[in-house]
């Protein structure tokens, strides 16, 4: 049977790993598919050797959950699988709707290792199905938002443009990556579809092909300026940046000025960007065009940008593509989806995964995540994981902050505000979260950057932010480890 590609694109229900369906089937056969379970999404290690990450992907998760259903094409495809699922199981899928609860950290929040980004509470049948897609959306978008935030950190006052579509890992990565970059402080994207879907400002110049398609560079610049007199940015490195490109751009600027218009910028896309930008700035200023900006592109990342700034580059705006949209130096976030509690005899009981790698041992139980804000400083002191029934943290009582790996390192804190990180998104399958505008998410992220000390945000050798377990949660973890060793 042939499948229609567009149907597969619009219905993401089978955007999952096959073993999820197999586990759903096994639970259904066993009669345990309606038992409740609690899963958490989190990552174990910060990307890019950095000090923080930026949560993103929630809006895509919401759209996905709202549209979960097994259509007849999905049912027919599953019927052909080698597992030979029973027809009654396929009927169960045909009637499937998501009726669980989801809590999540709002997009734009600064997040740290082992702190839940998303929590799914529901029938094991539905909680198992959504694992793969949620991880796919949150892992990718959080990674790109973090990379973009790092770039924003080294160029906080410059214009940042996302130019990555042609190098992105397919169409969805391009548009959702552009959105993630905008959340983290980028100002525009080259992708018109992302602009149309999300309201992100769009920017574009011209390619080398435009210059090559004319007899001379001067003719190409003049024709472009005549076509788009209000938005003229000229790419000056097709032949020779300083001997040809910049002088021809200056001539075009004079032509525009004679017509009451102005040249917006020139773009450098190759060569020694520090030296070329310095010389181009001098030439533009001496010609009487100090207002013309200099845009740079060419495989830029936060390290190159920081280096160029250290060399005194005269660059006002950065067009960043491959290194951002592919997160080239960290191709995956590594977020995981782990079972932390399951229903047994009508009660949710904590479960644990034990590993020979200590960092892979899970934090068990149905718990809450808090950001501890020091009232004296107004800055975040730590993140704090506590079991759901613990009241001391909610009542503002004195709590103990200790290193879960080295518990003898601790301190007490009492003058604090505990902010719950996980917000209700779905309750009983119904959306209860009001999606903020993209501009509000972007502003929220900027606010978040002011809530932690600068040492956690620096690009090189950042200080490690504290993520603490409550005493009760740490003891539960130890008890379960010991119980499974006997």
Image (tube, helix red, strand yellow):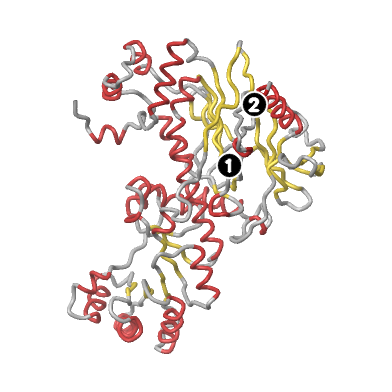
* Residue 50 position (above or below residue 283): above
The front one of 326 and 188 is 326
- Residue 44: numbered disc: 1
The front one of 415 and 400 is 400
Q: Counting other residues with Cα less than 10 Å from the Cα at mark 2, is it few (<14), some (14-19), or many (20 or more)?
A: many
Left or right of 303? Residue 256 is left
Circle 2 sits in a helix, a strand or a loop, which is it? loop
Q: Identify the residue position indicated by label 2 in the image.
A: 365
Q: Residue at x 61, y 51 (%)?
A: 448
* Residue 153 position (above or below residue 368): below
Q: Counting other residues with Cα less than 10 Å from the Cα at mark 1, is it few (<14), some (14-19), or many (20 or more)?
A: some
Left or right of 278? Residue 53 is right
Left or right of 289? Residue 146 is right
Q: Do callouts 2 and 1 mark residues in contact (Cβ within 8 Å)? A: no
Residue 242, quarter of the rendered image: bottom left
* Residue 279 position (above or below residue 389): below
Q: Residue at x 49, y 48 (%)?
A: 143
- Where, quadrant-wise, is the C terminus in this rendering? top right
Q: Position of residue 6 (x, y in %)?
A: 25, 35
- Where, quadrant-wise, is the N terminus in this rendering? top left
């Amino acid at each position: 049977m042939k499948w229609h590609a567009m149907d597969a694109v619009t219905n993401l229900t089978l955007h999952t790993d096959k073993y999820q369906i197999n586990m759903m089937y096994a639970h259904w056969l066993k009669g345990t598919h309606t038992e409740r379970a609690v899963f958490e999404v989190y990552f174990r290690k910060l990307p890019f050797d950095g000090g923080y990450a930026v949560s993103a992907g929630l809006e895509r998760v919401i759209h996905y959950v709202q549209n979960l259903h097994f259509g007849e094409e999905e049912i027919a495809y599953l019927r052909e699988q080698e597992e030979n699922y029973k027809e009654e199981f396929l009927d169960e899928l045909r009637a499937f709707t998501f009726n669980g609860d989801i809590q999540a950290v709002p997009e734009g929040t600064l997040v740290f290792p082992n702190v839940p980004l998303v929590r799914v509470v529901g029938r094991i049948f539905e909680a198992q199905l959504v694992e793969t897609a949620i991880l796919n959306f949150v892992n990718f978008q959080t990674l790109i938002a973090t990379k973009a935030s790092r770039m924003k950190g080294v160029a906080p006052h410059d214009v940042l443009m996302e130019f990555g579509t042609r190098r992105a890992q397919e169409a969805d990565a391009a548009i959702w990556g552009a959105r993630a970059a905008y959340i983290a402080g980028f100002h525009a994207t080259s992708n018109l579809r992302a602009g149309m879907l999300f309201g992100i400002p769009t920017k574009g110049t011209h390619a080398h092909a435009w210059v090559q398609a004319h007899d001379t560079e001067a003719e190409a610049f003049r024709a472009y300026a005549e076509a788009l007199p209000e938005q003229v940015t000229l790419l000056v490195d097709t032949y020779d940046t300083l001997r040809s490109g910049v002088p021809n751009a200056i001539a075009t600027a004079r032509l525009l000025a004679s017509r009451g218009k102005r040249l917006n910028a020139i773009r450098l896309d190759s060569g020694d960007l520090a030296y070329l930008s310095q010389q181009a700035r001098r030439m533009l200023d001496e010609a009487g065009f100090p207002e013309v900006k200099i845009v740079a592109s060419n495989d830029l990342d936060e390290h190159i940008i920081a280096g160029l700034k250290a060399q005194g580059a005269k660059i006002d705006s950065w067009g960043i593509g491959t290194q951002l949209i592919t997160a080239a130096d960290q191709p995956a976030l590594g977020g995981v989806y782990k079972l932390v509690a399951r229903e047994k005899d009508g009660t949710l009981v904590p479960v644990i995964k034990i590993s020979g790698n200590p960092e892979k041992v899970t934090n068990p139980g149905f718990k809450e995540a808090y950001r501890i804000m020091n009232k004296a400083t107004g800055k975040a002191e730590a993140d704090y994981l506590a079991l759901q029934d613990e009241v001391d943290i909610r009542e503002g009582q004195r709590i103990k902050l200790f290193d879960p790996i080295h518990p003898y390192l601790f301190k007490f804190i009492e003058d604090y505000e505990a902010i719950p990180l996980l917000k209700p998104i779905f309750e009983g399958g119904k959306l209860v979260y009001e999606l903020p505008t993209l501009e509000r998410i972007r502003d929220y992220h900027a606010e978040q950057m002011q809530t932690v000390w600068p040492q956690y945000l620096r690009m090189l050798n950042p200080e490690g932010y504290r993520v603490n377990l409550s005493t009760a949660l740490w003891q539960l973890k130890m008890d379960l480890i010991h119980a499974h060793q006997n």
